[in-house]
């Protein structure tokens, strides 16, 4: 297949025995299963291949391995060593339409090659930002060729990805707006063909999942019969978005024995921002910036964070940066709970959410959502997905608490080195894969220009009306919010 050969990644091909790396010095944000919290090790050391072998609380504690054959010792004195971040809900293919206002006609414009380069570059962007593991809700499975292209894009990236093949209707015409509602038949057939073959890709870094809106009995049975271990679905909150039972309740009713709680099959519900008590007991995902941007709201999400993780959602509207999502979620949760206290005419006497809790949301909780407790943590036996933060930038000089430094003061540029499965994928602030030299940027620019030019000729109102009908919505379900004014005199600056 031409697509597989034209963009093949050179990152990991030809690797045999996994090399050993010894990080010596620095501050390690480790995790203790016994205390269910972080333990900070100052001037420590860590030895790993694809798995963390040992962590010492002294710089020279693992020096006996420094001269072992095949061990690369890295001086991390003065740096912060963190687990990789985990994003449990994103649509990476939307990199092709970044900073654009609509995805409606994309199925009629973007080719499989466009999807491949968008997915590859989006995953690399996230990897550069320290997102070592992600759940890609791949709802660009308009044809088998598009699906294969998206899958190959994440494989070529070198990141750890649950690539979730979307099963659902496909837009086949914009004028008039027409949807193929039987597309799921071939989509499920394609999943059954792919399922036995996804494990070996990039040493098992890419895992096949299923995305559905909503899941059906046939989808759940396909997952169970073909060893697909994760299903993801939307559950958008608010009465205006719901018609009958929520997706969470529907799935729970479809699964005797409640496998959402006790089976090896993981369910990740995106958004889940308006839950009743029974739904709150089930797993969900919060996308802080998305809930604000699209007006979904998250009135009670702060109550269920023990089973929640973070995601980015629509990449064409946000960057693939979990540091930003942790920060936004921390401060928006604080604001809401502070306001409850202020409404009682009292002054808040402490903080309702800590930086460590926000950090858990962007790391370990993501691993638990995927039913992989060996991800998102630094501990012996965990997978070696590791970030090394430089603290030489002006915004981090003088830091004391490493978690607060990352959540409140760091940015993507501070991440110096990144390891995925023990392999170095970002070194000295630059990705190992030469995305500029291989022409990836030029290909993505060409796709973006192609989309903008085609979009300008599209009757977008037909798509807007069609999407309303697909969601059983009418004009009465919408209301313009208050529009702010940020300019003096005439006009609002909008």
Image (spheres, grey):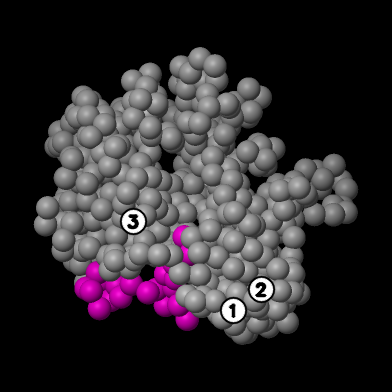
Q: Which residue is mark 1?
A: 66
Residue 387 sits in quarter: bottom right
Other residues around mark 3 within 10 Å, as few (<14) / some (14–19) / many (≥20): some
Between circles 2 and 3, the one closer to the viewer is 2
- The answer, for residue 441, to whether it is visible in the render is yes
Other residues around mark 2 within 10 Å, as few (<14) / some (14–19) / many (≥20): some
State which region is magenta.
421-441
The reply to whether dot 2 and dot 1 touch (C-beta < 8 Å) is yes
Q: Is residue 268 left or right of residue 52?
A: left
Disc 2/disc 1 C-alpha distance (Å): 7 Å
User: Looking at the picture, does residue 311 appear above or below residue 478?
Assistant: below
Other residues around mark 1 within 10 Å, as few (<14) / some (14–19) / many (≥20): some
Q: Which residue is mark 3?
A: 202
- The answer, for residue 79, to whether it is visible in the render is no
Q: Residue furthest left?
A: 2
Q: Which residue is mark 2?
A: 62
């Amino acid at each position: 297949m031409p697509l597989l050969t034209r963009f093949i990644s050179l990152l990991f091909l030809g690797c045999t025995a996994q090399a050993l790396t010894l990080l010596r010095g620095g501050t390690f944000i480790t995790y203790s299963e016994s205390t269910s919290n972080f333990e900070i090790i100052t001037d420590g050391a860590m030895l790993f291949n694809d798995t963390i072998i040992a962590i010492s609380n002294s710089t020279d504690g693992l020096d006996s391995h420094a001269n072992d054959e095949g061990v690369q010792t890295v001086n991390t004195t003065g740096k912060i060593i963190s687990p990789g971040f985990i994003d449990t809900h994103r649509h990476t293919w939307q990199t092709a339409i970044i900073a654009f206002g609509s995805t409606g006609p994309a199925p009629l414009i973007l080719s499989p090659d466009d999807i491949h380069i968008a997915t590859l570059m989006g995953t690399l962007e996230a990897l550069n930002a320290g997102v070592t593991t992600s759940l890609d809700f791949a709802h660009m499975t308009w044809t088998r060729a598009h699906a294969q292209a998206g899958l190959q894009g994440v494989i070529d990236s070198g990141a750890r990805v649950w690539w979730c093949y979307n099963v659902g209707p496909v837009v086949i015409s914009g004028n008039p707006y027409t949807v193929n509602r039987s597309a799921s038949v071939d989509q499920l057939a394609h999943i059954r063909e792919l399922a036995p073959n996804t494990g070996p890709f990039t040493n098992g870094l890419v895992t096949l999942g299923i995305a559905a809106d909503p899941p059906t009995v046939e989808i759940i049975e396909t997952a169970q019969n073909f060893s697909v271990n994760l299903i993801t679905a939307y559950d958008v909150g608010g009465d205006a978005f719901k018609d009958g039972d929520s997706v969470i309740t529907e799935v729970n009713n479809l699964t005797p024995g409640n496998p959402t709680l006790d089976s090896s099959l993981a369910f990740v519900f995106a958004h889940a921002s308006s839950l009743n008590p029974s739904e709150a007991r089930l797993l969900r995902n919060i996308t802080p910036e998305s809930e604000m941007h699209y007006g979904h709201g998250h009135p009670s999400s702060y109550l269920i964070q023990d089973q929640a993780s973070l995601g980015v959602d629509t990449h064409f509207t946000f960057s693939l940066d979990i540091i930003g999502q942790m920060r936004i979620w921390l401060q928006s949760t604080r604001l809401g709970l502070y306001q409850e206290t202020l409404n009682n005419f009292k002054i808040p006497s402490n903080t309702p959410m800590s930086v460590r809790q926000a950090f858990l949301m962007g790391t370990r909780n993501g691993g638990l959502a995927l039913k992989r407790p060996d991800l998102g943590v630094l501990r012996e036996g965990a997978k070696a997905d590791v970030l090394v933060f430089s603290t030489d930038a002006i915004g981090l000089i003088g830091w004391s608490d490493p978690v607060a430094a990352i959540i409140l003061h760091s940015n993507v540029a501070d991440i110096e080195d990144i390891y995925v499965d023990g392999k170095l994928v970002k070194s000295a602030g630059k990705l190992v894969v030469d995305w500029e030299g291989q022409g990836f940027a030029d290909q993505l620019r060409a796709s973006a220009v192609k989309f903008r030019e085609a979009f300008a000729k599209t009757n977008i109102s037909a798509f807007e009306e069609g999407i309303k009908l697909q969601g059983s919505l009418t004009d009465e379900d919408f209301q313009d919010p208050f529009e702010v004014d940020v300019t003096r005199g005439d006009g609002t600056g909008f």
